[in-house]
């Protein structure tokens, strides 16, 4: 047995959460793969309540995460707000501000 597996088994035995880390999904998860799964899931289900967290993911350090987030937002809204996942940081920041303003203005309306 590899050590991480041993530690996971020990944690489960001790009553810790035993969720499969390879299936974890969450926009704020520490695991980049879990964040990517959350973005993919939002894209597949066209979950419009995910628009706000998708906007947040545009600020990710991971270019793949940024690309997937903008393509999902574009698919859901028909907009990019001029965002380019590979643009220099200052250009991405300006586009993220446009997304935030759009969201706050209620163009799409906050979820719920």
Image (spheres, grey):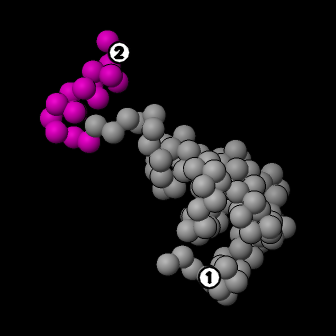
Residue 98: image quadrant is: bottom right
Residue bearing the label numbered 2 = 2
109 left or right of 7? right
Query: Quick check: can you spot residue 59?
Result: no
Query: Quick check: can you spot residue 36?
Result: yes
The residue sitting at 54% across, 76% down in the picture is: 111
Q: Secondary structure at mark 2?
A: loop
Residue bearing the label numbered 1 = 109
Mark 1 surroundings: few (<14), some (14-19) or many (≥20) residues within 10 A? some
Q: Return the residue found at the far top.
A: 1
Residue 53, percent across and down? 57, 64
Specify start and end residues of the magenta stretch as a single range.
Answer: 1-17
Q: Is residue 8 above or below residue 74?
A: above
Which dot marks residue 84?
A: none
Alpha carbons under labels 1 and 2: distance apart? 48 Å
The residue sitting at 71% across, 73% down in the picture is: 99
Residue 11: image quadrant is: top left
Can you say which quadrant of the picture contains the N terminus? top left
Q: Is residue 85 magenta?
A: no
Residue 74, percent across and down? 77, 62
Q: Is residue 8 above or below residue 3?
A: below
Q: Secondary structure at mark 1?
A: loop
Between 61 and 66, the one lying in front of the other is 66
The residue sitting at 15% across, 35% down in the picture is: 14
Q: Is residue 31 above or below residue 11?
A: below
């Amino acid at each position: 047995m590899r050590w991480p597996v041993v530690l996971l088994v020990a944690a489960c035995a001790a009553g810790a959460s035993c969720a499969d880390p390879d299936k974890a999904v969450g926009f704020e998860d520490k695991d980049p793969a879990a964040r990517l799964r959350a973005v993919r899931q939002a894209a597949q289900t066209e979950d419009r309540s995910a628009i706000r967290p998708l906007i947040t993911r545009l600020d990710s350090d991971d270019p793949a995460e940024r690309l997937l987030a903008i393509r999902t937002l574009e698919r859901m809204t028909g907009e990019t707000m001029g965002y380019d996942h590979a643009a220099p940081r200052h250009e991405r920041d300006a586009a993220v501000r446009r997304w935030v303003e759009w969201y706050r203005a209620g163009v799409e309306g906050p979820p719920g």
